[in-house]
Image (spheres, grey):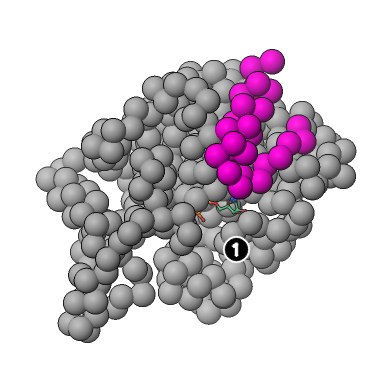
Amino acid sequence: MITVLAGGVGAAKFLEGLAAVMPQEEITVIVNTGDDAIFHGLHVSPDIDTVIYTLAGLADRERGWGLRDETYQCLDALGKLGEETWFTIGDRDLATHLYRTRRLREGALLSEVTAELVQLHNLRLKILPMSDDPAPTLLNTSEGVLSFQEYFVRLRQQPEVLAVDLSAAAQARPAPGVIEAIERARAVIVAPSNPIISIGPILAVQDVREALVDTKARVAAISPIIGGKAMKGPADRMLASLGHESSATAVAKIYADFLDAFFLDCQDVLLQAYVERYGMRVVVANTFMSSAIAKENLARVVLETLET
Ligand code: GDP
């Protein structure tokens, strides 16, 4: 089994490559739920849905969230009723949230509902939420304390992030199978996701970081930062405002206690010696996943490195 720690878009791109070069049945994904929120009474799990929709070939790649060819009639109607509509939910996406919410109300666990959604989308890999307990990430920003989606979607990541509150994740128990997936994996891969708000919450869940340190499996991470910049989203600015360097080196440092290997982009070859100082093997590769071939090549290089 190969276990992948995942946020949303960056992780989903990597997982497409991985699922193309190895049997899906042998992949387990542990997904961040720190972004989960309730909108219109419905439980939305953005990172889980991004991973499922992308692997099922249904994602809207241009926008980076939601489903392709969506319509927004329900959202328009909600707006006319005076509801807040800054969190865009398409009509077909709504079906996922209605289903999830009904099952949770019936007493099902988020991990159970996620397994059902995986199966209903004809996927064969295992997708585990990091926890079945609510673990909302809060951000202390220049505009005050914000929920994740207020910061990310409503305010378009404009406020400066001064501190990240992962205390809910720190109280959360890992979902069934999470610790086993780290302990029993052949290898663990930290996807190129935001280290602070996508991977950070997973690492904060009880026992997860310790399991990564203790596992016999090799653990590798792929840098989400290339040439000091995030390809999308606020990871670079967030690293800087939280007192880190905005670089791949800083990402390696955040993960240094549990990493055996780190994948740097070719553009960052000059950082190799700096990252090696953290005591890990550094592999320089093309991590820019601009095509299906690029995704598969990256997945292949990562697997080969972890298995030799
Ligand atoms: P989110 O939860 O949807 O924001 O997604 P993630 O946290 O999984 O991914 C966001 C991160 O993915 C950003 O920091 C991007 O720099 C990174 N990313 C996106 N595409 C690529 C890519 O092709 N290569 C690499 N190395 N990183 C990427």
> In the rendered view, would you say 300 is above or below 146?
above
Nearest to the observer: residue 56 or residue 250: 56
Q: Is mark 1 within 8 Å of ligand 1?
A: no
**What residue is disc 1 on?**
234
Q: Which residues are magenta?
A: 283-308
Residue 296 inside the magenta-drawn segment: yes
Query: In x, y percent, where is residue 262?
Result: 71, 35
Nearest to the observer: residue 182 or residue 88: 88
Report the predominant secondary structure element of the magenta stretch. helix
- Residue drawn at x 72%, y 51% is 226
Query: In x, y percent, where is residue 62?
Result: 48, 59
Using the rendered view, name the quadrant where residue 228 is placed: bottom right
- Residue drawn at x 20%, y 83% is 80
Nearest to the observer: residue 96 or residue 61: 61
Query: In x, y percent, where is residue 230?
Result: 65, 57
| Residue farthest top in this picture | 308
